[in-house]
Image (spheres, helix red, strand yellow):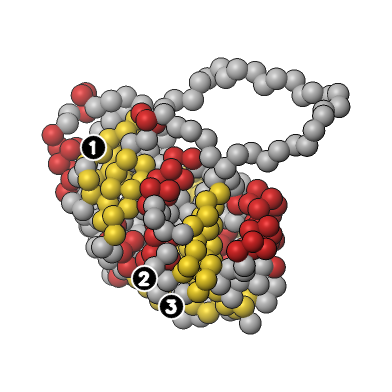
């Protein structure tokens, strides 16, 4: 339905459906228009702020007919801070919208969607990891620094630091905060190192003949003691060490619900943890497998993974998933035997092409694919389906309530 009507540069607009990325889509004439902070079914007065050849972007000027799911945001900085974008929506309806968006992504890719299992936790006071810019938050769609003294989605340990440390006393640059009652220390602050603006020029390529064989990169590189900012958190009764400057899940309550979804029901001789990070899932896989192979190219994460897996039978590869597939996977399977299960947790870009090609032909009976970007996950799952895998189960993991961000867990079995 198209209810758009232009009046003095303003458009009367019907928000038809939520799309991936957190905006509502509707029509203006024959063009799609995407509007943030809207809710499907609402009639709005909007203004077009950016025009493109095949779609436009708008902003709300006035809500003409409000959705019954619209609520008062819990944060006075909402829409100014660049963090949350779903805080104007009733929480239970947030989850429904995410499930609808996820289902449409699968259907558009031609994939059958099993019933989506929604896994939820606290929708406020849940976030343990914060990234600060010059002591504040980045503004929405700008480089403006928004001062912040408290955040409704932050855990109490973060909010205590924010309230006690004035903006003018906070370190400049990109600061990484991690806090939780089950962490040691309960609060950590680390500054991300700045990359040199004028790095040393690369040496010109050697064009002559080289003697000897080209050796693959070593699995590990040494680190300085001050490079690692270790934090220990208790997850499902186990103590996990990770680097405060690196990636770790921000919602520990949801992580404790996710671990059983990944580890329970899996057992055998060999398990693969591809993009293992600090080895969080490997620690639990080690309880039911004779050996776990971890692949992670971030050297600080791999150092933490080695600490977490100390005393447990494992193989470690401090390289990318692509390099593992090209250089190590076949030889490893010949040496230790095939994998009985794999856990895959790639970055937003998804599984690397070479790794996905190997994985899809590996014959691994069960693959648990955890994703922070359903669009690339759907792309990768389509490849697995082409090679004989069936998507048996989909979980929508609401790690980031009040935002459009979603994480998903797909269980794939070889038919």
Q: Is residue 106 left or right of residue 91?
A: right
Residue at the spot of label 3: 265
Tell me which label, 2 or 1, sits earlier in the chain. 1
Q: Give the class, few, some or many, for how many residues have Cα within 10 Å of label 3's Cα (few <14, many ≥20).
A: few
- Local secondary structure at mark 1: loop
Q: Residues within 10 Å of mark 2 (few under 14, many from 20)?
A: few
Q: How many angstroms separate mark 2 from mark 1 (CA)? A: 35 Å
Which comes before the other along the chain, label 2 or label 3? 2
Q: CA distance from mark 1 to mark 3?
A: 44 Å
Residue 178 falls in image quadrant: top left
Q: Which mark is residue 260?
A: 2
Residue 177 placed where, x, y %? 29, 39
Residue at 60% across / 39% down in the picture? 218
Helix, strand or loop at label 3? It is: loop
Q: Is residue 121 left or right of residue 263?
A: left
Residue drawn 59% across the image and 47% down it: 320
From the image, tell me which residue sits under label 1: 148
């Amino acid at each position: 339905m198209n209810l758009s009507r232009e009046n003095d540069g303003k458009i009367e607009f019907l928000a038809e459906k939520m799309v991936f990325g957190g905006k509502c889509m509707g029509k203006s004439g024959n063009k799609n228009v995407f509007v943030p902070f809207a809710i499907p079914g609402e009639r709005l007065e909007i203004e077009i702020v950016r025009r493109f050849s095949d779609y436009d972007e708008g902003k709300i000027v006035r809500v003409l007919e409000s959705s019954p799911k619209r609520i008062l945001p819990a944060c006075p900085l909402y829409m100014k801070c660049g963090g949350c974008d779903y805080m104007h929506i009733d929480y239970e309806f947030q989850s429904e919208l995410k499930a609808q968006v996820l289902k449409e992504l699968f259907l558009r890719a031609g994939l059958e969607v099993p019933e989506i299992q929604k896994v939820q936790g606290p929708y406020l006071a849940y976030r343990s990891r914060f990234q600060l810019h010059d002591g504040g938050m980045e503004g929405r769609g700008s480089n403006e620094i928004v001062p912040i003294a408290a955040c409704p989605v932050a855990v109490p340990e973060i909010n205590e630091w924010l309230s006690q440390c004035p903006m003018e006393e906070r370190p400049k640059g990109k600061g990484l905060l991690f806090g939780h009652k089950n962490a040691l220390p309960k609060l950590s602050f680390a500054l991300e190192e700045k990359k040199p603006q004028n790095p040393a020029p690369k040496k010109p390529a050697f064009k002559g003949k080289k003697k000897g064989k080209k050796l693959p990169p070593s699995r590990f590189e040494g680190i300085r003691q001050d490079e690692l900012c270790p934090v220990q958190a208790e997850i499902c009764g186990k103590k996990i060490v990770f680097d405060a400057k690196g990636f770790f899940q921000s919602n520990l309550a949801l992580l404790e619900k996710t671990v059983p979804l990944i580890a329970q029901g899996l057992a055998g001789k060999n398990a693969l943890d591809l993009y293992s990070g600090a080895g969080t899932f490997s620690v639990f896989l080690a309880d039911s497998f004779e050996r776990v192979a971890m692949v992670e190219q971030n050297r600080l994460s791999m150092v933490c993974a080695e600490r977490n897996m100390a005393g447990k039978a494992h193989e470690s590869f401090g390289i990318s998933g692509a390099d593992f597939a090209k250089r190590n996977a076949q030889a490893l399977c010949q040496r230790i035997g095939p994998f009985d299960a794999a856990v895959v947790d790639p970055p937003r870009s998804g599984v690397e092409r070479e790794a996905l090609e190997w994985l899809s032909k590996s014959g691994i009976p069960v693959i648990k694919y955890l994703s922070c970007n359903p669009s690339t996950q759907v792309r990768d799952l389509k490849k697995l389906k082409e090679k004989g895998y069936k998507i048996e189960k989909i979980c929508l993991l609401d790690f980031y309530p009040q935002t459009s961000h979603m994480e998903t867990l797909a269980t794939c079995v070889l038919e």
